[in-house]
Amino acid sequence: MLAGKRILLIVGGGIAAYKCLELIRRLREREASVRVIMTEAAKNFVTPLSLASLSGDKVYDDMFDLTDETEIGHIQLSRDADILMVAPATADLMAKMAAGQCSDLATTCLLATDKPVMIAPAMNVRMWEHAATRRNLATLRADGVHVVGPNEGDMACGEYGPGRMAEPGEIADALSEVLGSPLAGLESPRLEGKTILITAGPTHEPIDPVRYIANRSSGKQGYAIGAEAAKLGARVIIVSGPTRLMPPPGAEVIPVETADEMLQAVKDELPVDVGVFAAAVSDWRTASQADQKMKKDGSGKVPSLELTENPDILATIASSKKDRPGLVIGFAAETENVIQNAQKKLEKKGCDWVVANDVSPDTGVMGGDENTVHLVTSNGVEDWPLMDKSDVAARLMERVCDELDEGVWT
Ligand code: C5P
């Protein structure tokens, strides 16, 4: 999906800059054209000559180069591209981007662009984990910047951990995904005429008028799927437990609180073409709810809560004879044996695909912006790399479209 695309590659000053040579080759193999800007610091790691030779174009590095400014100009440089790719995105470059600084040609182009921007961070693990970098990353994401990697592994500085720049092939795939999806407004709406229903967020199961049983789900993954499906032209209905999220553009959000309400709202919307069950539905609710706020009576006696099972929304809809969507996708949030449990769930719940993820506390998935998932189907297991939840959503919707095109579901 990169053929004919114009990529403005901004090479930052980090040891991973050497991987940009391979990246340029990969991009050109895929018939993209690559124009390179390098920062002053990058010149310590890779030469302008090698970048120019591989890209087949001159390398831009000076904002005040009179010839360049008269011939193309820095604003034009950023506008002439389909996407800006920053690799390696050093901690310094990320900080400047997050702050909107424009002190050289690279940062000026990044501020002047109206095109999608992707970064491939690469830095020492402590720099990556530093609160300032986390803040900058969150800001960049909120600004719509796509992020690929970093990967975990041995680092040039002798440490181990996340901070290695994504491999050239992974970066090329990520670019292809962003440029190939209607995200970038380049393709026809592949899901036009289809309705996708998504459950998202937690449920709140009341104990009394002020207390409830809930979980840490933010709803971000489900809403991101809604956003991608809407961009692909689908009619999108999100049946959502309580979240703080804005409805994605083009999606209808039906707010509910409890699992019972969620099931009823889903049933009310059937039939639909695709059902994506991303909600973290509480497995249990209290057998009865107190009409008034429960109070301590001073005796030291602790009330016990009797629980009863909630309906399984996914299993109910997947087994429905009359209204089963053509494609039913479940999620499996697991803290151990992720894939085995997802495979069991595929069968037990009767869905077509299960998107499985590890939600152990140290992954930061619950409530976070990133997710590492495995797509489990009857054909096998696909392991996807660590991605933004929005990139997981885009890839999932791409798979949905592919199967629609192949006639696997109608
Ligand atoms: O059984 P478990 O909760 O791990 O299954 C996860 C999948 O089942 C998710 O897709 C979730 O949305 C769905 N589910 C449901 N109703 C429930 C429990 C889970 O739809 N009561």
Image: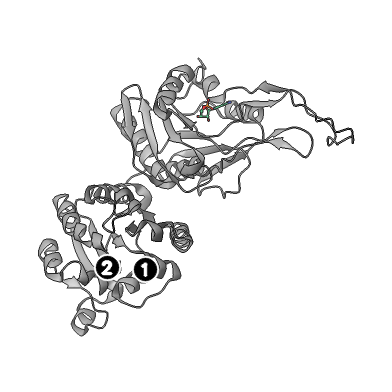
Q: Amino acid at mark 1?
A: Asp
Q: Is residue 261 left or right of residue 364?
A: right
Callouts 1 and 2 close, C-beta under 8 Å: yes
Residue depicted at x 40% and y 39%: 192
Q: Report if residue 321 is visible in the image.
A: yes
Q: Which numbered circle lies on residue 218?
A: none
Q: Quadrant of the C terminus?
A: top left
Q: Furthest residue to the top?
A: 321
Task: Give the structural element (helix, strand or loop) at label 1.
Answer: helix
Q: How many marks?
A: 2
Q: Report if residue 327 is visible in the image.
A: no
Give the residue at mark 2: 13
Q: Amino acid at mark 2?
A: Gly
Which of disc 2 and disc 1 is earlier in sequence? 2
Closer-to-camera residue (164/241) = 164
Residue 326 in the image, given as x and y percentages of width and height: 42, 24
Residue 275 in the image, given as x and y percentages of width and height: 48, 30
Check the image and report above or below for 174 versus 290.
below
Check the image and report above or below for 265 versus 163.
above
Residue depicted at x 53% and y 37%: 237
Check the image and report above or below for 36 versus 244.
below
Residue 295 in the image, given as x and y percentages of width and height: 86, 36
Which of the 4 quarters of the picture holds residue 119?
bottom left
Q: Is residue 343 left or right of residue 285?
A: left
Q: CA distance from mark 1 to mark 2?
A: 9 Å
Q: Furthest residue to the right?
A: 298
Q: How is the image coloured?
A: one colour
Residue 39 in the image, given as x and y percentages of width and height: 26, 72
Q: Is residue 357 left or right of residue 6?
A: right
Give the residue at mark 1: 92
Closer-to-camera residue (372/160) = 160
